[in-house]
Image (cartoon, coloured by chain):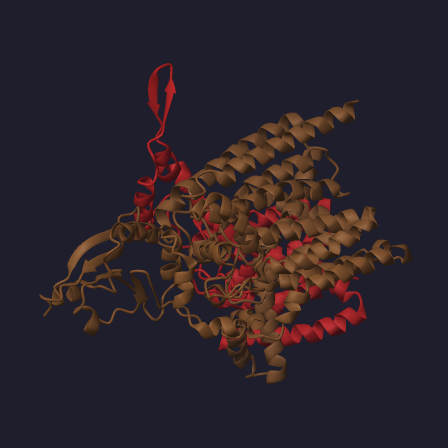
Chain colours: A brown, B red
């Protein structure tokens, strides 16, 4: 009787956590972050293009890997976004809605994973740990971001849950293996992690999974997985599959190896330099400083003054580690350690010092470790003591989250999030008869790439952008990796301003204070027509009308 | 293993650390205090004798004093010009916040509370200082890949000893908790005074050296581990030395 009562309560509280998550992930989704990052804009617009024409912005019919800005992103997120954009239209909100939905679903999946862990002793732990997961800055941030990472996280978590469930019900292998295979279409990292997860699970749980009676289920699952991989295999031999190699730190390794080469031969120096680089990166992803205190150095994937977890979570994190170490002979604990070491591997092979986006899957094993720490605390402290402490910490955490994400991020990161293009699109809409030249220097930063942002905000008919693209791209789509942000569509041109020719035409020149500097304004007798500032009153873009008759 | 042999193990960790040489180079007396504190902490952990604990405390107190004395200290709530500018920007970011109680409007100065109050600044600074000193990468990878701006980072222990450090942490026994907690106590001091010291958070050296030694114990007791471990160690040590030299 009592058990049934707790189960009902559990479902009620889980529902409450899902509602809290829904509120956190959907509140002001269309306005915070303030604008779209270029990857979001490319994702949203390509989904729109596929919806309207059955082709992406380059005119390729339903690609296997999306050529977005030359990245060849796995396509699942974009295909799943098509119905959302069909229902809600092409907006910031609709571009991000799939990620938010994945975040909400992930709450339930993570709850089920924690509930399935044998080492969890307290019946309250799954709920408490799920609540912490739902409000964690890392979860919230990527649940409000309109590209593929959160879908990949959901697919990864679902794969882990299905592996756990398959141990009890081997028939599920027929679903588990295809889902792991399908996750390779969710993001780049999963192409490495999915096979690792599959092999790791088979090795760790070999006694339960690799039995004669399970052979049929394994065979069917692997056959389905192989069928799912056919599209990936078709493009395996193209440049699109090697696209991320440039992120590897080969130069750093070689420079460091030169130092060691004063004492040791290069054949030893290079592996040594690589090992140190790799391990330093790997341990950064487990370091308390990176996880609880320091934000990601990339302003586009971090919030001001807040790391990926709340600072106080360092206590259950360390305690969780200790608990798991003590139980290390348990296979499910080994599985958590395996996930922990496996998840940051793709990111530990890339240059960036700490990249929360590439290691989003790490959120799962870290949540499980924190859950173990929470479990130990709950088990050893009376409810009347831990409950008020938890409530106070939760309140403090939500205040920190509100400050960092909902107040400081829109104020301090407007430029990174392409806020200026919302305003620019509004101005272009009200001036349909003017020609706009938008400056794109040769080394344009991602947040300054204009064409795809404007195409999205202006809801440019996809046929127009497709007509502007190099027709050779669609023919050799997976091998032509070079990318250009020089475009001409409707009344817009995105290119480097050519002062020799532009001042003789009646145009509106758009650029920042460096691209259209005050001396140039004076020299060419330009007339300012608008100015776009961020919330800190910093000028982001200025628009000037040329004066062909009065130009010097 | 005999206590003498185990002392040799600590000696190995001490000698192989570039940090201790840097400390000796900075001040010979300080280096001697660090070594003696490490030895007594190690002997205390091995034997659990009170006499060693008292000797450890006796040397540990001046060590903490040296840490305080040699650190460049700024008041914890002090803001430099850049931080003041950020504070001003942030103060303007908040919307007006009020509560209506019984027809009365009560304005809540939330921006002031979260950005300007001494307690808030203290919290953010403590967070920053604490995070720097608990980062394993600071000790084993010269803070790579997240080096601090304006700080000359240096490798304190060869990174090959990081797994043994973790192994050491997990093998600490409950009865030795008082040694470990005392060894870790400089974290509190450094959180308040900051980590601006030419030779780093050296008051934590004894803790690290002894925990690493603790983790090395099972490795040194098996010949096969010992031989392969030593070969790998020599290679890594050369690498660390090369990085520090060139």
Looking at the picture, tell me which residue is in the foreground, A177 or B239: A177
Question: Is any atom of residue B150 visible in this view?
Answer: no
- Front residue (pair A199, A425): A425
Quadrant where the N terminus of chain A is found in the figure:
top right
Q: Is residue B202 left or right of residue A237?
A: left
Q: Is residue A329 above or below residue A19?
A: below
Residue depicted at 54% across the width and 37% down the height: A22
Q: Position of residue A385 (x, y in %)?
A: 63, 28
Place of residue A295 in the rendered image (x, y in percent of width and height, measured from the top left): 47, 52
- What residue is rendered at 27% in x and 56% in y? A541
Number of dots carrying numbers: 0
Q: Quadrant of residue A198?
A: bottom right
The quarter of the displayed image where residue B162 is located? bottom right
| x, y percent for residue B65 | 49, 50
Look at 32% across and 50% down and name the residue there: B80
Relative height, residue A526 to residue A535 (above, below): below
Q: Residue furthest top?
A: B102
Going by the image, does A495 lie left or right of A128? left
Residue A251 in view, yes or no: yes
Residue B122 image point, x, y percent: 42, 41
Name the residue furthest right: A212
Asked whether A330 or A257 is in front, the reply is A330
Quadrant housing the C terminus of chain A: bottom left
């Amino acid at each position: 009787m009592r058990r049934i009562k707790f189960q009902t309560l559990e479902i009620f509280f889980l529902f409450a956590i899902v509602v809290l998550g829904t509120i956190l992930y959907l509140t002001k989704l269309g306005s915070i972050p303030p604008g779209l990052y270029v990857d979001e804009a490319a994702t949203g617009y390509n989904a729109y293009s596929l919806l309207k024409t059955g082709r992406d912005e380059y005119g390729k019919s339903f690609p296997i890997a999306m050529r977005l800005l030359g990245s060849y992103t796995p396509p699942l997120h974009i295909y799943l976004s098509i119905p959302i954009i069909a229902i809600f239209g092409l907006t910031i909100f609709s571009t991000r809605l799939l990620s938010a939905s994945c975040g909400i679903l992930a709450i339930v999946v993570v709850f089920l994973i924690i509930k399935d862990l044998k080492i969890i002793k307290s019946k309250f732990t799954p709920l408490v740990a799920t609540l912490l997961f739902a409000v964690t800055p890392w979860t919230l941030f990527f649940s409000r971001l309109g590209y593929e990472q959160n879908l990949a996280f959901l697919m990864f978590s679902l794969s882990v849950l299905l592996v756990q469930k398959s141990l009890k019900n081997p028939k599920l292998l027929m679903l588990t293996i295809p889902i792991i295979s399908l996750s390779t279409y969710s993001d780049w990292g999963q192409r490495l992690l999915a096979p690792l997860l599959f092999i790791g699970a088979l090795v760790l749980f070999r006694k339960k999974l690799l039995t004669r009676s399970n052979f049929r289920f394994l065979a069917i699952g692997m056959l389905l997985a192989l069928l799912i991989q056919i599209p990936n295999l078709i493009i395996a031999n193209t440049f699109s599959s090697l696209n991320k190699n440039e992120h590897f730190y080969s130069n750093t390794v070689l420079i460091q190896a030169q130092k060691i080469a004063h004492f040791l031969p290069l054949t030893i120096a290079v592996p040594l330099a690589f090992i140190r680089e790799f391990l330093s990166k790997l341990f950064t992803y487990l370091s308390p400083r990176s996880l609880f205190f320091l934000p990601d150095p990339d302003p586009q994937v971090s919030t001001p003054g807040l790391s990926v977890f709340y600072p106080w979570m360092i206590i259950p994190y360390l305690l969780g580690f200790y608990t798991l170490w003590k139980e290390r002979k348990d296979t499910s604990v080994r599985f958590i350690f395996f996930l922990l070491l496996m998840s940051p591997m793709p990111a530990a092979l890339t240059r960036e010092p700490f990249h929360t986006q590439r290691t989003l899957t790490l959120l799962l094993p870290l949540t499980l470790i924190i859950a173990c720490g929470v479990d130990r605390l709950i088990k050893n402290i009376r409810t009347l003591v831990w409950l008020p402490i938890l409530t106070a910490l939760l309140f403090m955490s939500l205040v920190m989250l509100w400050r960092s994400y909902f107040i400081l991020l829109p104020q301090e990161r407007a430029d990174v999030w392409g806020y200026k293009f919302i305003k620019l699109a509004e101005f272009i809409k009200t001036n349909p008869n003017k020609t706009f030249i938008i400056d794109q220097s040769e080394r344009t930063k991602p947040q300054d790439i204009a064409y795809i942002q404007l195409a999205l905000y202006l809801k440019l008919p996809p046929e127009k952008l497709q007509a502007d693209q190099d027709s050779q791209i669609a023919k050799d789509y997976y091998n032509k990796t070079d990318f250009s942000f020089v475009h001409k569509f409707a009344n817009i041109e995105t290119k480097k301003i050519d002062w020799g020719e532009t001042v003789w035409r009646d145009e509106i020149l758009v650029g920042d204070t460096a691209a259209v500097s005050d001396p140039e304004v004076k020299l060419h007798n330009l007339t300012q027509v608008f100015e776009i500032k961020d919330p800190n009153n910093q000028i982001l873009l200025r628009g000037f009308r040329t004066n062909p008759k009065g130009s010097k | 293993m005999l206590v003498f042999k185990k002392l040799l193990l600590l000696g190995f960790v001490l000698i192989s650390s570039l940090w201790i040489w840097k400390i000796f180079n900075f001040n010979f007396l300080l280096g001697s205090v660090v070594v003696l504190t490490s030895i007594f902490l190690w002997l205390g952990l091995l034997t659990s004798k009170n006499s060693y604990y008292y000797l450890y405390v006796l040397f540990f107190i001046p060590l903490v004093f040296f840490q305080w004395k040699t650190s460049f200290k700024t008041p914890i709530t002090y803001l430099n010009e850049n931080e003041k500018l950020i504070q001003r920007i942030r103060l303007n970011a908040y919307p007006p916040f009020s509560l209506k109680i019984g027809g009365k409007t009560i304005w809540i100065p939330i921006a002031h509370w979260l950005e300007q109050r001494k307690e808030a600044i203290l919290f953010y600074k403590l967070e920053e200082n604490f995070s720097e000193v608990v980062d394993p990468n600071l000790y084993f990878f010269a803070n790579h890949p997240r080096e601090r701006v304006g700080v000359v980072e240096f490798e304190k222990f060869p990174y090959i000893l990081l797994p043994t450090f973790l192994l050491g942490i997990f093998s600490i026994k409950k009865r030795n908790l008082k040694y470990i907690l005392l060894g870790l106590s400089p974290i509190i001091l450094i959180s308040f005074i900051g980590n601006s010291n030419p030779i780093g958070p050296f008051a934590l050296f004894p803790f690290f050296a002894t925990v690493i030694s603790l983790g090395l114990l099972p490795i040194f007791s098996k010949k096969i581990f010992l031989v392969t471990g030593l070969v790998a160690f020599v290679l890594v040590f050369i690498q660390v030395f090369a990085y520090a030299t060139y």
